Image (spheres, rainbow, N blue to C red):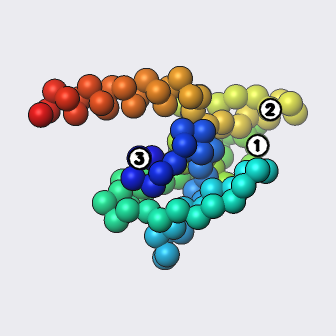
Amino acid sequence: MYGCGLRSSEALDLKIKSINFDTNQLTISNPKYFRVLSIPTKIISHLNCQIELVKKQFKKDVKSKYFHRIRQNKCYLFPMKQLCNNIDGLLIRLPIISNTLNYNLSLAAKKTKNNR
């Protein structure tokens, strides 16, 4: 997040399709604006690991007959652990909420202080 210059709301809305590893760029788009950011080479391996985790979760989700079928590249990069119902009663996986992100960031900051 920090290395790319992302806002927390942008990080929560990231999808796998937003990442282009060929050009090392991240595409952020919402109704208000569109921007393309460079991905630092230091975090590419971490992004690949996160994408693999999301893909594994997606494969498990697809086995449920109630899971709302979407393409794998439209999955959120930071999904919730549990599935939620959409308005049609089908199961979907939403992005983590901002409280979860803030909690994880504060834990990471504390770990960094303890390791110095």
User: In the rendered image, is residue 84 in sight?
Assistant: yes
Task: Please report the residue visible at 45 percent of the width from the left and 55 percent of the height from the top.
Answer: 4
* Circles 1 and 2 in contact, beta carbons < 8 Å: yes
Q: Earlier in the sequence, mark 1 or mark 2?
A: 1
Label 2: element kind: loop
**Dot 2 amino acid type:** Asn
CA gap between label 1 and label 3 equals 32 Å
Residue 98: % across, % down:
56, 28
Mark 1 neighbour density, 10 Å: few (under 14) some (14–19) many (20 or more): some
CA gap between label 2 and label 3 equals 32 Å
Height in image: 42 above or below 94? below
Q: Earlier in the sequence, mark 2 or mark 3?
A: 3
Height in image: 87 above or below 71? above
Residue indicated by mark 2: 86
Left or right, 89 with respect to 53, comes to: right
Residue indicated by mark 1: 68
Which numbered marker is on residue 2? 3
**Residue 93 quadrant:** top right
